[in-house]
Amino acid sequence: MESHEAANSIGDPIWPIEVRAVLARSLTAEYASLTRSGVPVTVPTTPYVEDRRRTIDVSTGLTYPAKAERARRDPRVCLLFADPIGSGLPDAPVVLVQGLASVRDSDLQANTDRYVRLSSTKLPETTAGRPKFFLRRMAWYYARIWIEITPLHMRWWPSRSLEGPVSRWEAPEGTAAALSDPAPPGEQPHAWLPAPRSWHELAAQLMAKSALCDLTVVDANGFPLCIPVTRAELISEGFELDLGPCAPELREGPACITLHTHAEVFKGQENRTIIGSLRRSGTNLVLHAERALAHWSIAGGSTRVAIGFLGKGRRLAPRLSQEASRRSQPVPVVRFPGDA
């Protein structure tokens, strides 16, 4: 099934009406980028539709910029919208967006102001009850790098089961993404958390909580391709996987599994990303797991979430001035709408 709606009267892309609510209202989407060696890394991230509907934007902390730096090196990325929890769209389609990323970090204060404004609107419960003086001390978290994603291809299915017919949209010929801001000089900061020792134990913990499971591979054009998994069984070497009948053909090779869960009212989340390689074993797909990546997971009640943020702040706050200095900018401050 094809969707032919492509452009409005001034030539700006108009995305299919069937997917607009999903793109705008989803609290999380799977964002996939590529390492230097071409391995896909997928993490759940909050998406924001740009006002003119030209890009779908995600962000990462200035103090942990790996997601942005991968996109700056290789702009081929994808977003999977397959998590309806908290969106108010229980019958939402599953939407795969592949596109080109533009990294924005030339104005850190504007980036921070934008994130404060948008996140407080979309995820109000994450800061409910916390005094502003406390939040203003969290510049290590609110200081942001934005990643603007220009969609080139969209596919969508009626549900995570991928049973219905797939619909498609292609960007108008000649669609291009703007260049990223120049990379800052100096070395990218090292990983701020150690990688977990056991991928198996981490996966078992989240699978016991009925976490959503998504698989990412690399397609024939070198783009990450992320789709929902209908069944994931934990085995000694990794995961045995089932996909829906209308899933795209997947290439063997570098891959990752992402498990994530959060409440209907978003106050925190749990997620795990496990890197490996996808292989066919007879009629089965098997993700041969190699390692789990360090993860940002904060779950539980308000007190536990607050304590979790404080712990992360102790690790990340010292990086703030260093990363601002690398970009020859002052350290951004946390400002709320209405501040003098």
Image: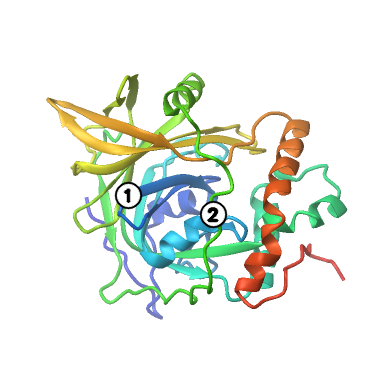
Label 2–label 1 contact, CB within 8 A: no
Q: Which mark is residue 39?
A: 1
For marks 2 and 1, the one nearer the N-term is 1
Identify which residue, 224 or 67, lies in the foreground.
67
Expressed as whole percent of the image width and height from the top left, the position of residue 258 reads 42, 37
The answer to which image quadrant residue 73 occupies is bottom left
Q: Residue at x 48, y 35 (%)?
A: 272
Q: How is the image coloured?
A: rainbow
Q: Element under label 1?
A: loop
The image shows residue 310 at horizontal and vertical percentages of 75, 43
Q: Amino acid at mark 2?
A: His
Q: Position of residue 57 (x, y in %)?
A: 51, 61
Nearer to me, 10 or 117: 117
Tell me: residue 294, above or below residue 138.
above
* Residue 125 seen by the camera: no
| Badge 1 amino acid | Val
Position of residue 180 measured from the top left corner of the image (x, y, whole percent): 45, 74
Crowd rating for badge 2 (residues with CA inside 10 Å; few <14, some 14–19, many 20+): few
Q: Report crowding for label 1: few under 14, some 14 to 19, many 20 or more residues within 10 A (C-alpha).
A: many
Residue 318 visible in the picture = yes
Q: Quadrant of residue 269?
A: top right
**At x 72% / y 48%, what residue is drawn?**
313
Of residues 7 and 67, the one drawn nearer to the viewer in this rendering = 67
